[in-house]
Amino acid sequence: MNDAGELLNILMWPMIACVILTGIHCYLGIHVLMREVLFVDLALAQVAALGAAAGAFIGVSVESTGNYFFALGFTMVGAALFALGRFRDRRVPQEAVIGIVYAVSSAAAILVLSKSATERDEIEQMLTGNLLWVGRHEVVKTALIYSLVALVHIVFARRFFALSRAQTLDGGRDKLWDFLFYATFGVVVTSSVKMAGVLLVFCYLIVPASCAMLFFRGVRARLLAGWTIGLLGSLGGLTIAAVWDFPVGPSVVAVFGAVFAIGAAMSAIAPRARTG
């Protein structure tokens, strides 16, 4: 009984963190899959790491609020590049722009770190996260940030989904709305990566949404299915990590991989996707 209670205490805040991670990332993942920009969060995470490295280079502690705003400022620049790099005639795929931003920001971060007194491990920690030991303060702060982002997306949901469906908005303001989408996306990624790491954040973004889109067409149905899959995968991964002393991120990712494999197999024999 004591062991079960101790395990529950260990998993409480990480599981709450997984709930909020699933909530925002499954929604954004549906947009990402519709836009076919699968690696946008990896690119934005690397841009955020470049911002953190730049802040550390001038003496701003990696763990400080100031360094967070450095990283966030750099992600805003990345958001602007992605908005401007969405060409209507598709002469250059947006994935090419994302790949270029990722490669250049990775190289720039290495160059900055090579001349910085800050240990590179501190920057790498930002990209790997430590979800199992996340505490109440970080969870509450992240939840508040996500709530503000969610409010923006609720208010402008029709415009964001219109762009994700490759529709043109009235007035030709597509670039501005695209920038707002990627800016809010960047806020989420900057906050999520520090808590959960790049690999896990990518899986939260893609796997639940992909599984849901295998079976459903309606946005609401996809969201409900994705949230359920994300929560079950999180619980399974956290339990495995805590019981068998495995790293949290790889454990949750492995469970998500198994879930997606099962979903893909089921979709091969199931009827056509429902409208939900």
Image (cartoon, grey):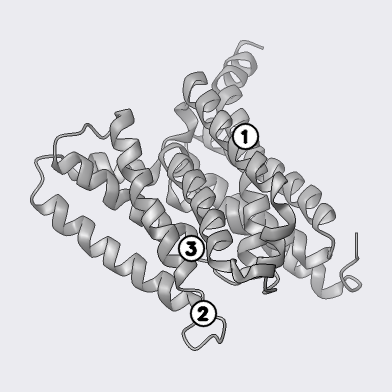
Q: Residue at x 64, y 18 (%)?
A: 4
Is 226 placed left or right of 114 in the picture? right
Between discs 1 and 2, the one toward the N terminus? 2
In the displayed structure image, the side of residue 186 where residue 256 appears, left or right: right
In the image, 154 versus 236, the foreground residue is 154
Question: What x and y, as percent, mark residue 193?
Answer: 44, 44
Q: Tell me the residue at 90%/66% (across/down).
A: 274
From the image, tell me which residue sits under label 3.
40
**Marks 3 and 2: in contact by CB < 8 Å?**
no
Q: Amino acid at mark 2?
A: Phe
Q: Residue 115: which numbered mark, if any?
A: none
Which mark lies nearer to you, 1 or 2?
2
Residue 19 in percent (x, y) is at 65, 35
Which image quarter is the C terminus in?
bottom right
* Location of residue 201 in the rendering, given as x and y in whole percent from the top left corner: 51, 49
Residue 34 versus residue 111 in the image, above or below: below
Q: Which mark is residue 147?
A: 1
Quick one: quadrant of the N terminus? top right
Inter-mark Cα distance, 1 to 2:
31 Å
Which of the 4 image quarters holds residue 206? bottom right
Residue in the image at 58% along x and 30% along y: 143
Q: Secondary structure at mark 2?
A: loop
The amino acid pointed to by label 1 is Ser
**Camera-side residue of 10 and 169:** 169
Q: Earlier in the sequence, mark 1 or mark 3?
A: 3
Look at mark 2 in the image and give the residue it sits on: 87
